[in-house]
Image (cartoon, rainbow, N blue to C red):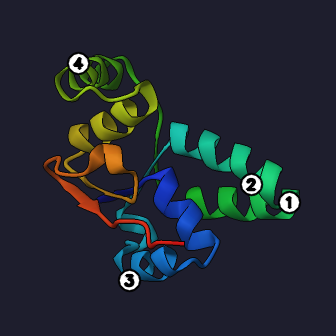
Amino acid sequence: MRLVDSSAWIEWLLLTPTGERIGPEFPEMSDQLVPTLVEFELVKWLRREASEVAVHAFLAYSQECVVVPLTTEIALKAAELAVEYKLATADAIIYATAFEHGADVLTCDRHFEGLEGVIYIEKAEA
C-alpha cells in the first residue's frame, strides 16, 4: 500500500519536472490509501487553482482507492509522531495514517525526508 501526499499529487497534476519523476511511483488505485485529509487538501487546492470539473474528477478517482477517515487511533498515533518527529499536524496525520495501514508515503514535502517508510522525491529547481 502507498499513500500519495498532497505535495506529490500537486506536482503530478501540474506536470512539473518533479511530477514527471513522481508519476512512475504512483500506485494502482487498489493499492493507494487516500486519507480524507488529502481529499480535503486536494479539493481545496483544485477549487482555487483549477475547476469544479477537476474536483469531481479527483473525487471520482479517490473513491476507487482506499479512502481512510481520521479515526481516534490515527489521531493518537499522529500526536505521538508529531512530538517525536516535530511534524505539523497535517503531516503527522498523513504519516500516522500510512503507519497504521502498513503503507509507505510518496511525497516531495521536505518535512518527511529521512523518515522510515517515506519515498521522498526532492522538488526540481525552478
Q: Which mark is residue 51?
A: 1
Q: Amino acid at mark 4?
A: Val
Residue position for label 2: 46
Q: Which numbered disc, 2 or 3, marks the residue that appears first in the sequence?
A: 3
Circle 4 residues within 10 Å: few <14, some 14–19, many ≥20: few
Circle 2 residues within 10 Å: few <14, some 14–19, many ≥20: some
Report helix, strand or loop for mark 2.
helix
Q: Is residue 121 left or right of residue 12?
A: left
Query: What's the residue at 23%, 37% (across, down)?
Result: 100
Q: Nearer the viewer, residue 101 or 122?
A: 122
Q: Which numbered disc, 3 or 1, marks the residue that appears first in the sequence?
A: 3
> Mark 4 or 1, which is nearer the eye?
4
Report helix, strand or loop for mark 1.
loop
Q: Which quadrant, please, contains the C terminus?
A: bottom right
Circle 1 residues within 10 Å: few <14, some 14–19, many ≥20: few
Give the image location of residue 58, x and y in percent.
Answer: 67, 61
Residue position for label 4: 83
Q: Which mark is residue 97?
A: none
**Is residue 64 something that shows in the picture?**
no
Circle 3 residues within 10 Å: few <14, some 14–19, many ≥20: few
> Mark 3 or 4, which is nearer the eye?
4
**Do the residues under discs 1 and 2 have CB atoms within 8 angstroms?**
yes
Give the image location of residue 54, x and y in percent.
Answer: 78, 64
Q: Which mark is residue 24?
A: 3
Report helix, strand or loop for mark 4.
helix
Q: Which numbered disc, 4 or 1, marks the residue that appears first in the sequence?
A: 1
